[in-house]
């Protein structure tokens, strides 16, 4: 809430954010930063989530509620981000217009990769999926800032907003798996 409030009223944290963003724009190799930023595109992140949902359903059809929860959380991203963008109406770093807070690409990356990791982890021998999801999400945010698509607080705001959602998905998935493992099969 503090991040959103600071951005909305252009408080001291927002002023520091603009200074940091201007210092970071264009830093690093542009091609790598663009690749990182693209990780948050729906065309990249949604197929990863779809593959995880498909994998879980192939492994155990009784997990359809877990899969449905993952899809619902992904559908909630634009439902939460778009109204906030309209309400806050933050100017873009390098482009005309408003509506850049919070970062939809960061939210998409966090939810798609994080939820995919939560779905497949119970079926893996080693627990590598969540660290990979974290790296992909952080890389997305870094790329967005370095390319000048978002201010740093746009990214942080998305991480805070959807960081609160993912634990709910994890708890729900564990509960649903436990309840379906206790039910009888045919």
Image: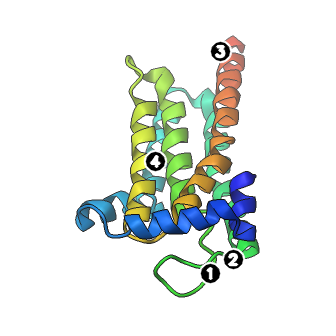
Q: Return the residue at label 2.
A: 89
**Can residue 103 be seen at all in this image of the molecule?**
no
Q: Are marks 3 and 1 in contact (CB under 8 Å)?
A: no
Q: Is residue 98 left or right of residue 21?
A: right
Q: Position of residue 150 (x, y in %)?
A: 50, 68
- Marking on residue 137: 4
On screen, residue 178 above or below 30:
above
Q: Return the residue at label 1.
A: 98
24 and 97: which one is in front? 24
Indicate the secondary structure of the residue bearing disc 4.
helix
Disc 3 from disc 2: Cα separation: 47 Å
The residue located at (40%, 66%) in the rendering is: 23
On screen, residue 84 above or below 63:
below
Disc 4 crowd rating (10 Å Cα; few below 14, some 14-19, many 20+) is many
Q: Which of pointers 4 and 2 lies earlier in the amino acid sequence?
A: 2
On screen, residue 170 above or below 49:
above
Q: Is residue 18 left or right of residue 136?
A: right
**Which mark is nearer the camera, 3 or 1?**
1
The residue located at (63%, 55%) in the rendering is: 157
Q: Are marks 2 and 1 in contact (CB under 8 Å)?
A: yes
Q: Which of pointers 3 and 2 lies earlier in the amino acid sequence?
A: 2
Disc 4 from disc 1: Cα separation: 23 Å
**Which mark is nearer the camera, 4 or 2?**
2
On screen, residue 145 above or below 68:
below
Q: Return the residue at label 3.
A: 181
Disc 2 crowd rating (10 Å Cα; few below 14, some 14-19, many 20+) is some
9 and 132: which one is in front? 9
17 and 126: which one is in front? 17
Quadrant in the picture for residue 83 = bottom right
**Which mark is nearer the camera, 3 or 4?**
4
């Amino acid at each position: 809430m503090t991040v959103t409030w600071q951005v909305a009223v252009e408080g001291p944290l927002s002023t520091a954010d603009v200074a940091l963003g201007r210092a970071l724009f264009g830093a690093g190799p542009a091609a790598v930063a663009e690749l990182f930023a693209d990780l948050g595109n729906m065309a990249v992140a949604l197929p990863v989530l779809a593959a995880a949902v498909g994998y879980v359903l192939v492994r155990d059809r009784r997990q359809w509620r877990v899969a449905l929860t993952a899809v619902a959380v992904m559908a909630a991203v634009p439902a939460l981000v778009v109204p906030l963008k309209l309400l806050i109406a933050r100017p873009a770093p390098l482009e005309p217009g408003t509506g850049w807070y919070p970062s939809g690409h960061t939210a998409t990356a966090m939810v798609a990769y994080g939820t995919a990791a939560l779905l497949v982890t119970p079926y893996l021998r080693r627990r590598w999926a969540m660290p990979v999801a974290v790296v992909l999400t952080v890389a997305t945010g870094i790329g967005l800032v370095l390319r000048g698509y978002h201010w740093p607080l746009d990214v942080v705001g998305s991480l805070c907003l959807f960081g609160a959602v993912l634990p709910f998905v994890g708890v729900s998935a564990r509960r649903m798996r436990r309840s379906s493992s206790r039910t009888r099969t045919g």
